[in-house]
Image: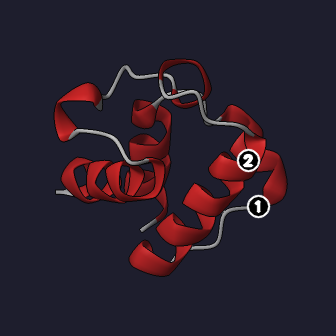
Amino acid sequence: MIFERVREIICSQLDLDEDRVTMDSNILEDFDADSLDLVDLVMSFEDEFGIEVPDDQTENFHTVGDIVRYIEENT
């Protein structure tokens, strides 16, 4: 499932326990990530799922759910 793979990538890159990552988790606020972390995550999602995310679209990625829904709609 897409959520599980997104969660694995987030946990790996931000050094988090999987139980901290839910669909409602706010990437910047809940994980103390910054905009550079988000860019790195997006590049990993692009590689993993074979998609391209326009720069203006990343502004809409606030929660893990936002990312999962975008990937579901674009794969």
Compared with residue 41, is residue 38 higher up or lower down, i.e. above or below?
above
Q: Mark 2 is on which residue type? A: Gln
Q: Residues within 10 Å of mark 2 (few under 14, many from 20)?
A: few
What colour scheme has been applied to the protein in the rendered image? secondary structure
Whether residue 46 sits left or right of residue 39 in the image: it is left
In terms of depth relative to the viewer, which is nearer, 52 or 21?
A: 21
Secondary structure beneath disc 1?
A: loop
Q: Mark 1 is on which residue type? A: Pro
Disc assigned to residue 44: none
Q: Is residue 22 visible?
A: no
Q: Are marks 2 and 1 in contact (CB under 8 Å)?
A: yes
The location of residue 68, given as percent across then percent down, is 39, 45
Q: Which residue is mark 1?
A: 54
The location of residue 67, given as percent across then percent down, is 48, 44
Mark 2–mark 1 Cα distance, whole angstroms, equals: 5 Å
Q: Which residue is mark 2?
A: 57
Q: Residues within 10 Å of mark 1 (few under 14, many from 20)?
A: few
On the rendered image, what quadrant is the N terminus found in?
Answer: bottom left
Q: Can you name the residue that lies furthest to the front here?
A: 15
What residue do we see at 25% from left, 47% from top?
3
Compared with residue 17, is residue 2 higher up or lower down, i.e. above or below?
below
Compared with residue 60, is residue 56 higher up or lower down, i.e. above or below?
below
Q: Quadrant of residue 75?
A: bottom left
Q: Is residue 32 visible?
A: yes
